Image (cartoon, rainbow, N blue to C red):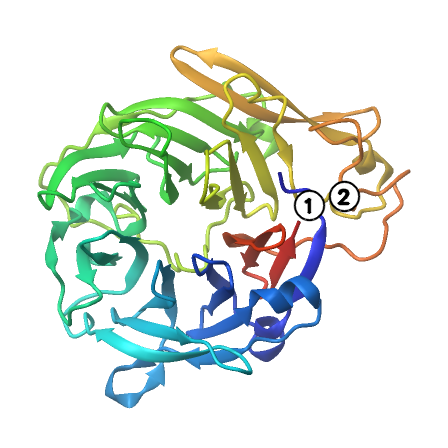
Amino acid sequence: RPQGVLLATLYEYAHQSGVPVVKVDTTDDSRILVTGGKDGVVKIWNCAQLESDVAVSSSHTFSAPCGSSRRRHRLRALRTVRNAKAVAVGTEAGDVFMYKIVPSRGSPTAMQVCHFAAGDQAGACAVMCIEQFDTELESLVVFAQQRGAVKGWDIRSRSPCWSDLTVPPWLGVPSCLALASDGHALVVGTLGGGLLLYDLRFIAPWKQWRVSSGAAVLALRSDNFRPLPGVFTALAGDCNEVALFDVTRGSCLTLFLTEPATDRQREAAISVPTLLEAQQPRAGPAATPDLLGIAPDSATGDWHSAGCVRSLWLPPRGAQTFLLAGGTDRKVRHWSLDPEHHAAEAYIVTPHDALGSTSRSREHTTYSSNHLGDVFVVQEQLTRGGPAKSSAGSAPLAGEPEEGRPRGPNPNHRDAILDMCSISLQREILVTASRDGLVKLWK
């Protein structure tokens, strides 16, 4: 389990351009870390050096070009390609580029090998999200565009192998994707609160749902320990909601949340979100951007709530025993997926902010669990009074101040956490990327 001890901070984006780091991912052997900035600059890092040197610099830097002008364009999505030492990059112009990571004696470099030009069509077509899976028969990159098109691209070809799936405009702009581990099912989340399930064996829609609360879907991760398709879903709001939905039946199975960020709502009863069958609205006035869930800048997470999960992470190998969630409150939370230890093993991974306030130092978190109908709910609560301690045990959290006095600089991010991944070499390292332009490595 992650301990919340800061190993290193990568400052190149913050010092060179000051842009948010919107995406991070590693190759399947964890030897290469790939980071993507909002300005389209992609950096490659040698993970072996990251483990041994806290002042390491990137091995290679490149920018995704834009059309014939060869100018770089803003980056929206990024995903490494399994079993290929490659990375797929999606841009605001709608293009998807494939770069091969080439090892060399000095340091790895990247070479463009494929280009899927999807940006020559009319209308907004930014690539909002990318996922990839690899089988014996195909290596498929699936991506969704701002105007609702969902396309599959076998990287061995120069054209999409299918482009028949479309997200209805009244469900909002696609924001995230999740692929089932067997590659048979695809779930698309939208900023309008839609969850759409597609059967990739027939390239056909299966189910169309809308979240009952109307909250935007900001991140998805497939639940691979159940036989039926399910997804962990991060919902926009102010209490860091993460719901496990059965997307075939439309039911909520588990809900993880914190107290609302605003004091006025802390006494409100917990509302469990459900999935409702999505019905096309009746003809009426022209839809507004707010109705369609079009955010002003969804790539960098321009959401005003202070308690909103932007990224989810599950162990890529072995059993899915826990879930990590990071977001706009700059914290990473560990949620246990063991039904018998949901509350006992929940805790905040990142250190407490090193503040000198005596009252703040006497705050600590507790976790409660109960059933609301058929839904298992785990809630984090802030308790004032008594010594601050780790929610996972009696030992203080890493970086936690004693007697209200801070210890050195604050190790946490200064702004929202937008993405996470892991490095698995000699030890497990958690990587977080933030709107503050920093990439941090934690053990």
Return the x and y of residue 227 as percentages of the image width and height.
Answer: 28, 26
For the residues labelled 1 and 2, the Cα–Cα distance comes to 6 Å
Q: Quadrant of the N terminus?
A: top right
Left or right: where 425 falls relative to 74: right
Residue at 73% across, 43% down? 352
- State how many labels appear: 2
- Above or below, 16 relative to 313: below
Q: Which mark is residue 398?
A: 2
* Residue 127 can be seen in this image: yes
Inspect the image, locate mark 2, and give the three-letter code of the amino acid beneath it. Ala
Q: Position of residue 297 (x, y in %)?
A: 40, 60
For residue 117, above or below residue 161: below
Mark 2 Cα within 10 Å, few/some/many (few <14, many 20+)?
A: some
Judging depth in this view, the residue of 93 and 400 nearest the camera is 400
Task: Please report whichever mark, 1 or 2, sits nearer to the chain's N-terminal start.
Answer: 1
Q: Type of residue at label 1?
A: Gly
Residue identified by numbered label 1: 4
Q: Position of residue 419 (x, y in %)?
A: 49, 54
Question: Is residue 168 rendered to the left or right of residue 64?
Answer: left
In the image shown, does 239 or 114 lie closer to the viewer? 114
Q: Nearer the viewer, residue 168 or 55?
A: 55
Q: Please tell me whether residue 104 is drawn above or below residue 191 in the rendered image.
A: below
Residue under the image location 57 percent in, 72 percent down: 13
Q: Secondary structure at mark 1?
A: loop
